[in-house]
Image (cartoon, grey):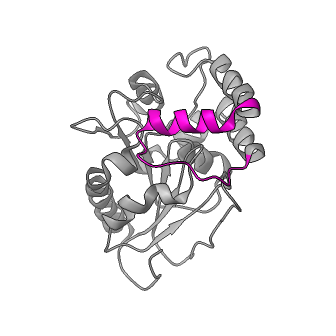
Amino acid sequence: MSKINSSPKPLLVFVHGWAVDQSIFNLLEESLPDFDILKYDLGFYGDAQHPDIPKDRTVIAVGYSLGLLWLLHEKPFQWDGLVSICGFTRFTRTDGFMGGMMTMVLEGMKMRLSIDPKGLLGETYDVCGFDRPFPENYDTRQLHQGLNWLKNWDCRDIFEEHKEKTIALAAVPDPVVSESLTKASFEGKCPTYWSPDGGGHGLPVTRPKWCAEKICEFAEKIADSSN
């Protein structure tokens, strides 16, 4: 974690997605050496970590997958800009939002988590393109909670309050967040940038430099608007 100082650049605050921890951002953090960075951890492996966010800094919140939904729902701090990486404003399908995941898929995952957590986590890492094993200290109760968040939270209205200072980064194909889900969440609301060479659902790991470039461009705009 970078040292917090008086840098004029915005402070970046990262929140990860389901079934991973804050280390999912390690490569992305290495690609942003000039920024101060803080990382939340939602407690899927070990204790949750919610760092104190300085109130005298320009802040850009970066939510990966479920992390974007969590930021919108929980609003743990105020931000000046918001970056979605493979994120969404609602995950499950409903009337008027047909791009989402079918609820029965999440119910199946919850059942699988109860009887075969290692198998489910291993498949999740494979699907997302995380070329590493999942941590062994997984917390099935918190993972179940995360699936409930994905199933139940709808932050479309909340996002309307923040869309003017948001960008979305996405990939096609993404085996978790489909193109239709990305468009249903962000199309016509905020700039959406598509990775030019894929990368799947694991963009912070598979395309960290591209993500960093887009974050840097956005940070410059946020810094200019804050001055």
Q: Residue furthest left?
A: 196
Expressed as whole percent of the image width and height from the top left, the position of residue 201 reads 42, 37
Where is residue 209 shown, x and y percent of the image? 27, 55
In the image, is 112 to the left or to the right of 189?
Answer: right
8 or 2: nearer the viewer: 2
Query: Which residue is at a point 75% across and 30% down the rendered structure image?
Result: 115
**From which residue to which does the magenta span run?**
115-139
Q: Is residue 120 magenta?
A: yes
Position of 98 with respect to 131 (left or right) is: right
Which of the two residues, 130 or 207, is positioned nearer the viewer here? 130
Quarter where residue 5 is shown: bottom left
Choose between 117 and 177: the one closer to the eye: 117
| Quarter assignment of residue 220 | bottom left
Reply yes or no: does residue 189 show up in magenta. no
Q: Is residue 104 above or below residue 227?
A: above
In the drawing, does residue 206 fall left or right of residue 85?
left
Identify the residue at image location x=32%, y=72%.
33
Q: Where residue 6 sits: x, y (%)?
A: 42, 85
The C terminus lies in which quarter of the figure? Answer: bottom left
